[in-house]
Structure formats: C-alpha cells, structure tokens
Image (cartoon, rainbow, N blue to C red):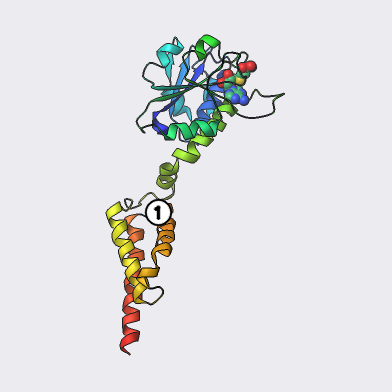
Amino acid sequence: MLANIKIVLVETSHPGNIGAVARAMKNMCLSQLTLVSPKIFPSAEATSRAAGADNILMRAEICDSLAEALQDCAVVIGASARSRTISWPELTPRECVNFLQTLPSQTKVAIVFGRENSGLKNHELDLCQYLLRIPCNSEFSSLNLAAAVQVVGYELFLTFGHQEIKAIGDAGAAPLANAEQMEAFYVHLLQTIADIGFLHPEKSRSIMRRLRRIYNRTHLDTKELDILRGILRFSQNHNNNNKSC
Ligand code: SAH
C-alpha cells in the first residue's frame, strides 16, 4: 500500500518545506512525491532540508495542474487545517488509514497538501473524495506543511509499514508460514498437549483457540515454525522416554 500512495504538494512556496516533506516521507517509507507548480524547484535549500532523502526529490513528478497529478489515482484525499462550509466527508489520519485498509492493496491513492499561506482552494477540494483533518488545538490548527505530512505518514506507517519493519530488522528472514503449515503446527501442538497430559483433547478447544490467537498475531516465518515444531517433538520424545522408564 505505501508504494501506491502519492503525496501531492500544491504550489508550495518555500523549497525548504519541499525538502522537509521528502525527509518526512522517507522516514515513513513513502516514496512518491508529486509537486504541482512549485514556486521554486529544484533548489539547494530543498536538497539540504531533505537531509539524505534527496532521492525522493530527484524522482519527484512535476505537474502543471492538480487534475494532471491525480490522473492515475482512484482515491483522492485532501488535507486541510480548516473545516469547510461545503462539507466533504471528514477523516482523521487514523480514520483515513482504516478506510485505506478496506481497499485492494493495488489501489492508487493521492493525499493532497495545500499552500503554506492559503491551503487548498475549494475547486481543488472538489477533486478530492475526502477531507483529512489532523485533530489539534482548535485555536491554532495549522501545522507546518512537513509536520502535517509527518503525522499522516506516521499513521500510514503504523498500519502499512510492518513489511518494511520486518525487511529492515530481519534482512535474511524466511517466508511467512502459510495457512497449511500453520494448521499442521496446530495439529502437532494439540497432539503434544494431549501426550504430555497438559489437557485432554476434548477439553482443549478454548485453550487451542487462545493459542491460535497468540500465534496468529505474531506472523511466524517458516524457520520460526521449524523451531517450535522441534520443541514439540522434543517434548513428545522426552515424555515417551519418561513413560518407558
Ligand atoms: N494557512 C493554511 C494552512 C496551510 S498549512 C490554511 O489556512 O489552510 C499547509 C498545508 O498543510 C495545508 O494546506 C494542509 O494540507 C496541511 N495541514 C496543515 N495543518 C493541517 C491540519 N491540522 N490538518 C490537516 N492538514 C493540515
């Protein structure tokens, strides 16, 4: 999903803000930046504020109009600090992510951010299906552009970034265990529980449901599953040896 989300900045005045947005995006594993008629770009200030995220700036798409920037997107969300008199369905960043989760993962999504001094105009919001508002102090509700992108990016990352977290933390990880492998593990686990006398199989339905919940939460990979099955085999052998003594 993160690879299919573009961050669109409309008529940004300060190149430093464009750089700071690129940095915020890279922190949150977002990579697609689109600039609609930026006032000054490219610029040394943008590159300097990107602080190492200049690859995002180099790959940024530049468009003359918002409509052109949104052409390939199925879902368009406009970020605004202000509630509007005409009402668009309004989402917080978390609600926005919850909504995105309901879409097929290949859906192209745009999140549009407005000008530093005047935000998005109503005719630009007309191109958006939803309005995204970051809840904050009602008497001081306008965040810096890059800070707004950071907050939205953070929510996206919390939900869609787990693959990236796994990739960063565990480069040589085995593939995730599939449903068939997990079912074989649960059969083995139930058998072991019965063999070692921890629970009678007939009484073990609710405990097995809880155990499934624990393991399903962790998304085990095949190597991790092998370790667990090794422990089960060891317990069964140990139990059989004790019985025969
Ligand atoms: N002065 C402008 C705000 C500009 S801030 C105004 O009154 O609209 C630049 C952009 O950052 C905004 O257009 C919006 O896209 C985003 N932004 C800033 N604060 C936000 C908030 N609280 N919620 C959602 N987006 C926000």
Q: Is residue 162 left or right of residue 16?
A: left
Residue 19: image x %, image y %? 53, 24
Along the line of sight, the residue nearer the viewer: 168 or 71? 71
Residue 144, can we see it?
no
- How many numbered discs, if any? 1
Q: Which residue is mark 1?
A: 216
Q: Residue at x 44, y 57 (%)?
A: 214
Quadrant of the image containing the C terminus: bottom left
Q: Is residue 119 above or below residue 181?
A: above
Q: Residue at x 47, y 27 (%)?
A: 54
**Which amino acid type is marked by label 1?**
Asn
Residue 155: image x %, image y %? 52, 36
Residue 215, can we see it?
yes
Q: State ligand 1's quadrant.
A: top right
How would you rate the neighbour count of disc 1 (Cα within 10 Å): few for under 14, some for 14-19, many for 20 or more? few
Q: Is residue 126 above or below residue 142?
A: above
Q: Could you say whether the residue bearing mark 1 is in a helix, strand or loop?
A: helix
Along the line of sight, the residue nearer the viewer: 43 or 37? 37
